[in-house]
Amino acid sequence: MFENLGDRLQNALNKIKGYGKISEDNIGEVTREIRLALLEADVNYKVVKEFINNVKEKALGEEVKKSLKPGEVFVKIVKDELVDLLGKEDEPLIVVKPMTIVMMAGLQGSGKTTTAGKLALLTRKKHGLKPLLVACDVYRPAAIDQLKQLGKELNIEVYSEGKGNPVEIAKNAVEYAKNQGYNYVIIDTAGRLHIDEPLMEELQNINEIVKPNEILLVVDSMTGQDAVNVITGFNEKLPLTGAILTKLDGDTKGGAALSIRHLTNIPIKFIGVSEKMDGLEAFYPERMANRILDMGDLMGMIEKAEDLMDDEEALKAAEKMQKGKFDLEDFLTQLNQIKKLGPLENIIKMLPGAKKMGLNNVNIDPKQMAHIEAIVLSMTPKERRNPDILKASRKRRIAKGSGTSVEEVNRLLKQFDQMKQMMKKINSGNFKMPF
Ligand SMILES: Nc1nc2c(ncn2[C@@H]2O[C@H](COP(=O)(O)OP(=O)(O)OP(=O)(O)O)[C@@H](O)[C@H]2O)c(=O)[nH]1
Ligand SMILES: [Mg+2]
């Protein structure tokens, strides 16, 4: 996500960090590089121009002159400007009313149907809402089945009348939702290759009749420069309340994201980061700017962990760690929790300075994780609680049982020991993060 842009911005900013003085002359090269980086990432040229002007104006202002570390203040200015571009304040991501109606809009293939499913799952899981999906794409033959399939997978009801008038279907669906106790109605609509009159009219009609609380524009982030036309086209015809950028997991330059807010003033609320139903993330401008500039996204990392981990288990483990009583039995529980987080690489990337430490491209071999788990599983509960009793013959048995070698068993035990030492250090307050 934004990797190329991030690299280039970081390179430009690294140069200026050490500057003792900032003047019109010496920031010329850096601002030129920032300008190119943004343009090459497909950020709209008007947006880039204003970005650079703002940065220059602030950089040559009084505050920077007075500062002892002007280079670092410059980096901060660029970061703040980036946050501004991405959306400034955090918006309420989910509108919650006694009955919320959401309409999805967007071009063909942008990800409306998939995102409708993801949103339904998220509102149920995170906000405890009762979502109902509504099939209003009556044109594409397989569209209704696609939504029904998602509904089945998620165990969320799909309201459908087959082919018919989308406006009527939407109206009936809201009635149905009220009667059945649903409180979050998500209307999936048809897409077109280009913005055309009949599509817009249909969406406007649905809007007039069911009066959605939210109209979310789904934008494929691979669209590049043209995204701006799509976004302004929809924005002129419909009172959009937010945008969702999909396919940010793909090979996208990201510029569309950096232009939406500035050109339309609608907030980006979510980003799609995988094809799977849990691949929808809340969009926070500040966190995204941090990620782009390799300043890490610790909040995101913690939230992700909190979402997936079992609170009670985590608390128990933390307590044991504090008391220095963490054993291999606990380690096994932790391994299982970590597995729930998905590929570890994705988590490590969110650390501040991950790129600088070369951690953005690490490959954690799932086989190695499996070996570790097999070794611990081949121990008896007594051995896990008390690894000191592991002498040569026991180690041989464990190696054989787990299909590994005695060296591997030894390595794991050594690593576990080191981990325990580190925990002790952390607990005694003698530990400093390496960044
Ligand atoms: N990798 C990735 N794929 C996505 C994401 N969102 C959607 N897709 C894929 O994009 C394709 C199109 O998604 P749909 O949800 O069918 O798009 P749509 O807007 O409903 O399309 P129409 O109904 O034809 O207008 C599907 O193959 C989805 O799996 C995402 O965030 N990441
Ligand atoms: Mg669809």
Image: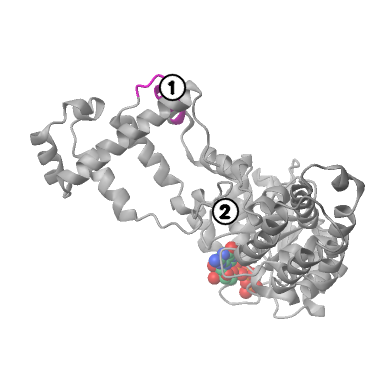
In reply to whether residue 318 is colored magenta, the answer given is yes
Please identify the quarter of the rendering in which residue 320 is found. top left
* Residue reaching furthest to the top: 323
Which comes sooner in the sequence, label 2 or label 1? 2
Q: Secondary structure at mark 2?
A: loop
- Is label 2 or label 1 in front? 1
Please identify the quarter of the rendering in which residue 335 is found. top left
Residue 158 in percent (x, y) is at 59, 57
Residue at the disc numbered 1 = 322
Q: Residues within 10 Å of mark 2 (few under 14, many from 20)?
A: some
* Residue reaching furthest to the front: 20
**Is residue 144 among what the camera can see?**
no
Residue 428 sits above or below residue 264 on the image: above
Q: Magenta segment, which residues?
A: 314-325
Q: Inspect the image, locate mark 2, and give the three-letter code of the amino acid beneath it.
A: Glu
**Is residue 340 among what the camera can see?**
yes
C-alpha gap between disc 2 and disc 1: 46 Å
Q: Inspect the image, locate mark 1, and give the three-letter code of the amino acid beneath it.
A: Gln
Q: Is residue 358 left or right of residue 401?
A: right
